[in-house]
Image: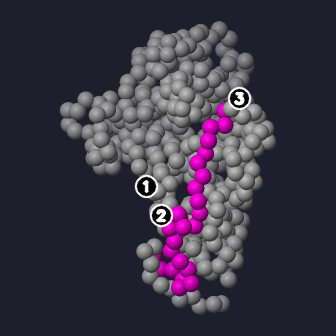
C-alpha cells in the first residue's frame, strides 16, 4: 500500500499530488434551449427535474454534467450520448484533464442551494458555478477508478429508481381510473358534480414587500418554490427563514390549504399543487406561489391535490397557463375553471386513502434508496478527499 502524504488546502487536507481547481478551469458551460418547435423522436430532453420528453434533434453529444440554472439547482445530473437540455439546465463540455463522471461526483459534494442567487425561484449563474473549487486527483487513471467505484453504488440506486418508476406507473393508472370515476370504489354510485374553484374557496398571496435582506434569518419561515414543484405535501425540509415583523400584514399558511406556484419557465410546471397536511406556526409562502383556502370542510384537500397533480389537473393548468418565454397562472382564470369531483366527501376520503397508501409505499422505497445515497455520500467523502486511494 502506498503511503499518502497530505498538504493543507482551502478545501482541507489533500494528497500532495492532487490539486484544488476552480470549475471554470476544468470545463465549459453550454446553455439549454427551447425544444417545442421540434418533433418527437429518439433523443431525450432533460430539465432540472430530469427527463421531460424525446425529440428528433440533439443539442450535445458526449458525456456531460448538467446543473440547474433555475428551479432545482441542487440536483446535478450526468448524461451521455445525444441529448437536449431546456433553458433552465446548463450542460458542460470541453473537459480539461478531468473526466466528466469524476466531475459529476465532485458536483454532488457541493451545497448548491447555499449558493442560490435569488430570493424567489432558486437560481445559479455560470459565474457562481465556475467559481467553485473542486478536488482534482492528479491522474485520469485515479479519477476513473474513483468514478467506477462510485458508479457501482449508483447501479444499486438505479435498481430502486426502476422499482419506483414501476410503482409510480401503477399509481398513475389508479389515479386515471379513480379520479375520473371510470372505476368506482364499492358502495359509491352517485354521479359526480362539476364545480368552479371560486365556489370551493378563495386565494391569497405569498410574501410581499420583502427584499433579500429579509431572508435567511428571523423566527418565521416560508415555503420554498421547489417544495410545491416536486412534493405533493408541504415539507419542513423545504422551509427557509424569513424576517416578518410583529404586526406586519402577511398571509399565514394554514393546515388544509392548497399551495400553487404561479409561474414557471415551462408550462409543464405551472400550477403545481401541494397540500398543507400539518399545522405550522408563522409559516408563509414565497412570492412566486399563492394559497387556496376552502370555505367549508366539505372537500378533502388530499383528494383535490391528487386530482390536480394527475393528468387531468395538469392538462387543466397547462390550458390556463399564459406566456411565451415565461408562463403564468392567472388567478382569475384559475378560480373560474371547473373540475369534476364526488358529491359525497366519504368517496373523496376513500379515494384519497387508496392513493395515499400507494404513495406511502412509494415513499418507503424512496427511503431505502436514500440510504444507499447516504452510503454513496460517505464513499465520496473518503474517495474525493484522497483519504482512501484506489491506486
Looking at the picture, does residue 252 appear above or below residue 9? above
Where does the image place residue 53, in percent across and percent down from the top left? 71, 38
Distance between the Cα atoms at labels 2 and 1?
Answer: 10 Å
> Does the CB distance between marks 2 and 3 fall below 8 Å?
no
Please state the extent of the stretch shown in magenta in the rendering: 12-36
Nearest-to-viewer mark from 2 and 1:
2
Q: CA distance from mark 2 to mark 3?
A: 45 Å
Q: Quadrant of residue 9?
A: bottom left
Q: In this view, which residue lies farthest toward the right?
A: 42
- The one nearer the camera, 83 or 114, is 83
Q: Position of residue 157 (x, y in %)?
A: 68, 56
- Say which residue appears at 46% left-offset and 13% top-offset: 198
* Left or right: 116, with 300 as reference point: left
Of pointers 2 and 1, the one earlier in the residue sequence: 1
Residue beneath label 2, please? 132
Q: Is residue 170 visible?
A: no
**Callout 1 crowding tier (Cα within 10 Å): few <14, some 14–19, many ≥20:** some
Mark 2–mark 1 CB contact (< 8 Å)? yes
Q: Residues within 10 Å of mark 2 (few under 14, many from 20)?
A: some
Distance, label 1 to label 3, CA atoms, is 40 Å
Q: Residue tagged by mark 3?
A: 174
Mark 2 or 3, which is nearer the eye?
2
Q: Is residue 286 visible?
A: yes
Query: Callout 3 environment at 10 Å: few (<14), some (14 to 19), or many (20+)?
Result: some
Front residue of 96/256: it is 96
Residue 64 falls inside the magenta stretch: no
Query: Is tag 1's residue or tag 3's residue first in the polypeptide sequence?
Result: 1
Is label 2 in a helix, a strand or a loop? loop
Residue under numbered circle 1: 115
Q: Position of residue 81 (x, y in %)?
A: 75, 54
Amino acid at each position: 500500500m502506498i503511503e499518502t502524504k497530505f498538504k493543507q488546502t482551502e478545501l482541507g487536507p489533500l494528497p500532495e499530488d492532487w490539486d484544488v481547481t476552480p470549475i471554470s478551469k476544468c470545463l465549459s458551460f453550454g446553455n439549454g434551449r427551447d425544444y417545442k418547435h421540434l418533433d418527437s423522436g429518439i433523443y431525450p430532453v432533460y430539465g432540472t427535474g430530469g427527463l421531460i420528453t424525446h425529440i428528433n434533434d440533439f443539442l450535445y453529444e458526449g458525456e456531460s454534467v448538467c446543473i440547474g440554472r433555475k428551479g432545482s439547482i441542487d440536483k446535478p445530473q450526468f448524461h451521455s450520448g445525444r441529448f437536449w437540455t431546456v433553458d433552465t439546465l446548463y450542460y458542460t463540455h470541453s473537459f480539461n484533464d478531468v473526466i466528466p463522471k469524476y466531475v459529476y461526483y465532485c458536483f454532488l459534494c457541493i451545497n448548491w442551494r447555499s449558493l442560490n442567487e435569488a430570493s424567489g425561484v432558486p437560481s445559479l449563474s455560470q459565474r457562481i458555478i465556475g467559481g467553485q473549487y473542486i478536488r482534482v486527483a492528479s491522474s485520469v487513471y485515479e479519477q476513473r477508478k474513483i468514478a467506477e467505484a462510485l458508479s457501482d453504488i449508483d447501479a444499486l440506486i438505479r435498481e430502486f429508481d426502476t422499482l419506483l418508476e414501476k410503482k409510480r406507473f401503477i399509481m398513475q393508472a389508479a389515479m386515471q381510473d379513480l379520479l375520473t370515476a371510470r372505476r368506482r370504489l364499492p358502495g359509491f354510485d352517485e354521479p359526480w358534480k362539476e364545480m368552479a374553484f371560486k365556489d370551493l374557496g378563495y386565494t391569497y398571496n405569498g410574501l410581499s414587500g420583502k427584499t433579500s435582506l429579509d431572508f435567511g434569518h428571523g423566527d418565521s419561515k416560508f415555503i420554498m418554490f421547489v417544495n410545491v414543484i416536486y412534493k405533493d405535501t408541504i415539507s419542513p425540509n423545504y422551509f427557509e427563514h424569513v424576517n416578518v415583523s410583529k404586526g406586519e400584514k402577511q398571509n399565514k399558511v394554514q393546515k388544509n390549504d392548497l399551495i400553487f406556484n404561479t409561474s414557471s419557465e415551462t408550462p409543464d410546471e405551472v400550477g403545481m399543487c401541494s397540500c398543507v397536511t400539518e399545522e405550522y406556526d408563522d409559516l408563509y409562502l414565497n412570492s412566486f406561489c399563492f394559497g387556496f383556502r376552502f370555505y367549508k370542510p366539505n372537500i378533502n384537500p388530499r383528494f383535490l391535490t391528487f386530482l390536480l397533480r394527475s393528468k387531468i389537473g395538469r392538462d387543466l393548468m397547462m390550458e390556463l397557463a399564459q406566456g411565451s418565454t415565461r408562463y403564468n397562472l392567472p388567478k382569475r382564470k384559475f378560480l373560474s375553471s371547473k373540475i369534476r369531483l364526488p358529491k359525497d366527501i366519504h368517496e373523496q376520503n376513500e379515494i384519497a386513502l387508496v392513493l395515499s397508501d400507494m404513495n406511502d409505499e412509494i415513499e418507503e422505497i424512496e427511503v431505502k434508496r436514500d440510504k444507499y445515497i447516504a452510503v454513496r455520500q460517505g464513499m465520496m467523502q473518503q474517495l474525493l478527499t484522497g483519504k482512501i486511494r484506489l491506486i
